[in-house]
């Protein structure tokens, strides 16, 4: 089971339970593989973050680790100590977004980046800088309010 891919402690526990092992057998097996270093949630988190090809924001990375059974505080710590900062990942996401979708409007780009888990202030700061360096005006559409006569 562990030879196919790295698992978190929670994932291993769930798989063993699904296969019908008792709680005592599962507990003993999980403790054994943890002791032998085959299951290491901190290592899993670091490898998951550094191996992620898609640039994601800190919030999204933490959420994905928690879904895989990593403790929220441990997930936050792993994300905070990742090789690439959130700012670097945001820059990479912006570059890829505009490289693959050349006619994308800035509001659409901002929404796409928010879905990737990046914070709105960082997104708008990055998009403003991009617009200034490219000599573009950010297109902000304000709804036209019609006055009642």
Image (spheres, grey):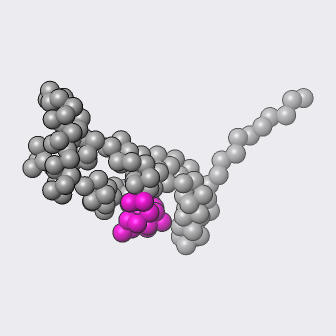
Q: The N terminus lies in which quarter of the figure?
A: top left
Residue 82 locus on image (x, y percent): 38, 65
Q: Is residue 88 left or right of 124 when viewed as pictured? A: left
* Residue at figure coordinates x 19%, y 34% from the top left: 24
Q: How many marks?
A: 0
* Residue at figure coordinates x 17%, y 29% from the top left: 22
Of residues 20 and 22, the one nearer the viewer is 22
Residue 117 locus on image (x, y percent): 47, 50
Magenta region: which residues? 77-96
Q: What main secondary structure does the magenta stretch of the protein show?
A: helix
Q: The C terminus lies in which quarter of the figure?
A: top right
Residue 14 locus on image (x, y percent): 24, 35
Decide whether residue 100 is among the magenta residues.
no
Q: Is residue 140 left or right of 9 when viewed as pictured? A: right
Residue 133 locus on image (x, y percent): 55, 72
Of residues 14 and 28, the one nearer the viewer is 28
Based on the displayed image, in which of its 4 quarters is residue 129 positioned? bottom right
* Residue at figure coordinates x 16%, y 50% from the top left: 33
Q: Is residue 17 left or right of 59 when viewed as pictured? A: left
**Furthest residue to the top?**
20
Of residues 16 and 82, the one nearer the viewer is 16
74 in relation to 20, above or below: below
40 in relation to 13, above or below: below
- Does residue 143 appear anywhere in the picture? yes
Based on the displayed image, in which of its 4 quarters is residue 51 positioned? bottom left
């Amino acid at each position: 089971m562990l030879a196919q891919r790295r698992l978190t402690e929670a994932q291993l526990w769930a798989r063993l339970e699904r296969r019908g092992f008792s709680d005592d057998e599962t507990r003993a097996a999980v403790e054994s593989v943890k002791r032998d270093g085959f299951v290491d949630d901190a290592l899993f988190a670091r490898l998951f973050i550094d191996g992620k090809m898609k640039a994601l924001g800190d919030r999204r990375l933490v959420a994905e680790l928690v879904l895989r059974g990593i403790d929220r505080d441990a997930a936050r710590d792993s994300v905070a100590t990742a090789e690439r900062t959130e700012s670097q990942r945001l820059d990479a996401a912006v570059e890829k977004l505009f490289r693959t979708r050349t006619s994308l409007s800035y509001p659409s780009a901002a929404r796409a980046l928010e879905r990737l888990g990046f914070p709105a202030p960082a997104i708008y700061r990055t998009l403003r800088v991009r617009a200034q360096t490219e000599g573009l005006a950010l297109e902000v559409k304000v709804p036209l309010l019609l006055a009642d006569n």
